[in-house]
Amino acid sequence: MNGERHEHCRIGPQCHAVRTGERAAGGGRAGGNGAGGVQRGQQTVCVHFAGGDVDSDGDSDGVHDVGFTWKARDPALVAARPALTVSTLVGSTRVGFVWDRKLARYVRTVEGRKVVTASGAPVAKPNVLVQFCQIKADPKDHDVNGNHTMYTRTIGSGPVVLFRGGKRIPGTWSRPGLDAPTTFRTAAGKPLLFAPGGTFVALVRPGAPA
């Protein structure tokens, strides 16, 4: 990816949500470099997509475990705070999503406009995960314009916020090593439950809004 790399996020080849051919409704294309980002001058904004269409407590053949626990129903939603919009910062670029009640999904937005595919379908998933990570410039790596690559550390631990069902659920993440999946838990220490159907993942700096 231009200008940004991650510490083996394990999401794999489906590690992007904003692809070539997707555009903001009523405007230009939202991503033109095919690298899973929104181009903003010399900066690429990474918003990952992790697939997931299985409601299961166990492993499924052919499914790569990145640490998500998929469940259609989550009792925590009853007491969770409403969150019909999500707005955060990836680098210096604002990243947004809006809850669509009819679709029962969060729709990706760019500068307030909904992002759609080339066929006109909204780019939407039932979950948005904002994961707070340490991000720093790598002085040994830079792009063709001389801009230092931003290195996102996904080993360790930190806070997360999961948005699903139009609600906001705070929690934590932890990952002991490169070959391990990430563990996501609620503030009460229980597994963080993701709605089947896929997840937008925004890796952000500590202190970013969510």
Image (spheres, rainbow, N blue to C red):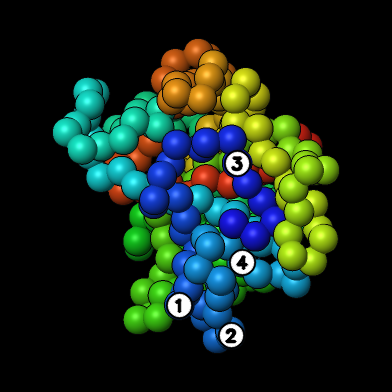
Q: In what quadrant of the picture does the C terminus appear?
A: top right
Residue bearing the label numbered 4: 38
Residue 20 pos. (x, y %): 48, 73
Residue 75 pos. (x, y %): 37, 26
Residue 24 pos. (x, y %): 55, 77
Residue 124 pos. (x, y %): 42, 60
The quadrant where residue 123 appears: bottom left
Disc 1 is placed on an element classified as: loop
- C-alpha distance separating marks 3 and 4: 17 Å
Whether residue 177 is situated above or below residue 92 in the rendered picture: above
Residue at left 67%, top 51%?
4
Residue at left 76%, top 54%?
142
Whether residue 120 is situated above or below residue 65 in the rendered picture: below
Q: In what quadrant of the picture does the N terminus appear?
A: bottom right
Asked if residue 136 lies left or right of residue 198, the reply is: right
Residue bearing the label numbered 1: 21
Q: Nearer the viewer, mark 3 or mark 2?
A: 3
Residue bearing the label numbered 3: 6
Q: Nearer the viewer, mark 1 or mark 2?
A: 1
- C-alpha distance separating marks 4 and 1: 11 Å
For mark 3, does the 10 Å Cα neighbourhood hold few (<14), some (14 to 19), or many (20 or more) residues?
A: some
Residue bearing the label numbered 2: 27
In the image, 58 versus 85, the foreground residue is 58
Q: Nearer the viewer, mark 1 or mark 3?
A: 3
For mark 1, does the 10 Å Cα neighbourhood hold few (<14), some (14 to 19), or many (20 or more) residues?
A: some
- C-alpha distance separating marks 1 and 2: 12 Å
Of marks 1 and 3, which one's residue comes earlier in the chain?
3
Of marks 4 and 2, which one's residue comes earlier in the chain?
2
- C-alpha distance separating marks 4 and 2: 13 Å
Asked if residue 43 lies left or right of residue 35, the reply is: right
